[in-house]
Amino acid sequence: MGARLLVAILMNKFIKSCCIILHKMGYKLLNIKALYYSIILRRCGSNFKLWGPCFIKNPERIDLGNNVSINDGVYLNGLGGIVIGDDVSISAGAIIVSTMIDPVCFRHKKIHLSKKITVGNNVQIGAGAKILGGISIGNNVIVGAGSVVTKNIEDNVIVTGNPARILRKLEL
C-alpha cells in the first residue's frame, strides 16, 4: 500500500511538471507568433508582445509603435489602415475594425467603406472595447472595458460607455 501511494504521488508530480513545461511552451509559441506578425505587419516597433491568441486581418496595413502589447482574443482588421503609437496595451477581447458597411448603399448593395484608425501614445484599450473605422484616439487615453468608440477622443482622458464618452480628464 505504501509503495502504491509513493508511485501515485511521484506520478502526480511528474504529470504536473509536464503540464507546467507545456504551459511554458505555449508562451514560447506566442513569442514565435509575435515574431511572425512583426515580419508581416507594415511596421512593428520594438518590444511587441502577444499574451494570448489573437486574430490580425490585413496585417500589411497595420503599423505598431514600440512597446505594444496585445492580449487574448483581440481582433484587428487593418483593411482601412491602423496606426498604433508607442506604449499601447490592447486588453482581452478588444476589437479594432477599420472597415464597415456603407449605410448609404445598404439597401441596394453591401459596399464596404475603409477608414483609417489612429491610436496615440500611452493608451490603454480596455477588455472588450470596440473601435470603429475613421476614429482617432489621442495620447494618454484610457478606453474603459466594453466601451464602443464612435467618435474621436482627445488627449488625456478616460472614456467609457456605449457610445464612449469622457468620464474625466487625466491629471498628468
Image: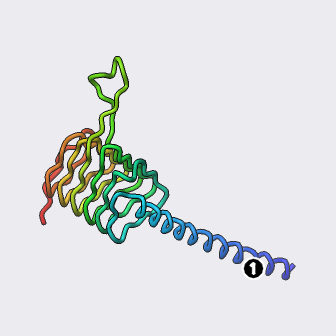
Residue 46 rendering spot, x and y as whole percentages: 34, 71
Q: Residue at x 33, y 61 (%)?
A: 43
Q: Residue 50: which quarter of the image?
A: bottom left
Residue 3 is left or right of residue 140, and the answer is: right
Question: 162 above or below 118?
Answer: above
- For mark 1, what is the residue? 10
Is residue 80 toward the left or the right of residue 16 in the image? left
Q: Looking at the picture, how far across and down is residue 88, in whole percent?
A: 29, 62
Task: Report the front residue among 4 and 169.
Answer: 169
The colouring scheme, among rainbow, by chain, secondary structure or one colour, is: rainbow
Give the class, few, some or many, for how many residues have Cα within 10 Å of label 1's Cα (few <14, many ≥20): few
Residue 151 falls in image quadrant: top left
Look at label 1 and name its amino acid.
Leu
Residue at position x 30%, y 48% in the image: 81
Q: Considering the numbered disc 1 on the image, is that residue within a helix, a strand or a loop? A: helix
- How many numbered marks are there? 1
Viewer-side residue, 159 vs 48: 48
Residue 7: % across, % down: 81, 79
Figure check: 140 above or below 6: above
Give x and y (percent) for residue 82: 30, 51
Give above or below for 3 relative to 144. Answer: below
Identify the image quadrant of the C terminus.
bottom left
Query: Relative to residue 36, is residue 42 drawn left or right?
Result: left
* Image quarter of the N terminus: bottom right
Determine the residue positioned at 69% across, 77% down: 13
Residue at position x 40%, y 64% from top? 38
- For this orientation, the residue located farthest to the right is 1
Is any atom of residue 160 visible in this view? yes
Residue lying at the far top of the rendered structure: 108
| Residue 93 visible from this viewpoint | no
